Amino acid sequence: MAENVVQEIILIAVVVALGITVIAFSVSVLYPQIILTSEEQVASNVASQTTLSVGPLLTSGSNGSLVLEVYDPAETGNVSIVAFYVPQSFETSVSLVTPNSLNFKVYSTSGALAKAQTVQRVYDLNGRVLYGSPLTTYSVPFNTPVTILANGYVKGDIVVIWVLYGQGDVFRIGYTFTGVPSS
């Protein structure tokens, strides 16, 4: 009789341990994936309604400036901006290039410097890591033109602008590029 009680207690302990293991696995592996998928869907919906308007790149020596507006009448929050130069020969593959050296600032129409922040990684809209290192971005409101000033221009470069969105995980919801107007 005592033997049966011990066996039942051991069986109950094993079942409880397995239950705790399944719950721990779910919380540590599945839950973050569910959250990422949910945030990806939100970012994808925002991306489908967002348009980017970018002006030409105006240069003076190694400095460049341009005006950008991220337009989505349904949104009232903020997006993050990243800008970087690449050679003009990269123009055909601009969707694939990632930031190399970043030396830019973003200003509002009033001339105030936008709020800088660091994101740890950037995902594409398919949930794949697009950029896996810490990245300095500037937070700007939707539907408001901003001025981007970027240092390091070399003749023939184009400037690539990424638009990022997300509260937890950050997604690239759009990108564009511009260069010096041809004469």
Image: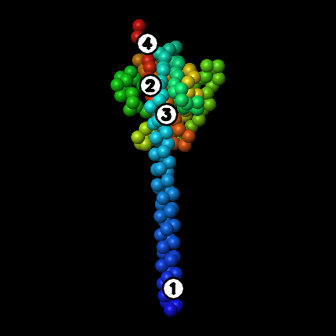
Give the residue at mark 4. 181
Q: Which residue is mark 2?
A: 176
Q: Amino acid at mark 4?
A: Pro
**Disc 1 marks which amino acid?**
Val
Q: CA distance from mark 2 to mark 3?
A: 16 Å
> Closer to the observer: label 1 or label 3?
3
What is the CA distance from the residue labelled 3 to the residue labelled 4?
Answer: 30 Å
Q: Which numbered disc flags the more N-terminal residue, 2 or 4? A: 2
Contact check, label 1 and label 4, Cβ < 8 Å: no
Q: Residue furthest front?
A: 74
Is residue 44 shown to the viewer in this render? yes
Q: Quadrant of the C terminus?
A: top left
Mark 4 burial class by Cα count in 10 Å: few <14, some 14-19, many 20+: few
* C-alpha gap between disc 2 and disc 1: 69 Å
Query: What is the secondary structure assignment of the residue under circle 1?
Result: helix
**Label 1: which residue?**
6
Q: Secondary structure at mark 2?
A: strand
- Specify the amino acid type for callout 2: Thr
Mark 2 or mark 1, earlier in chain? 1
Q: Nearer the viewer, mark 1 or mark 4?
A: 1
Which x, y percent locates residue 114?
61, 27
Front residue of 168/177: it is 168
* In the depicted structure, whether residue 140 falls above or below residue 180: below
The percent coordinates of residue 4 (x first, y second) are 48, 88
Residue ID for mark 3 = 46
On screen, 174 above or below 10? Answer: above
For image coordinates 54% across by 26% down, the residue present is 73
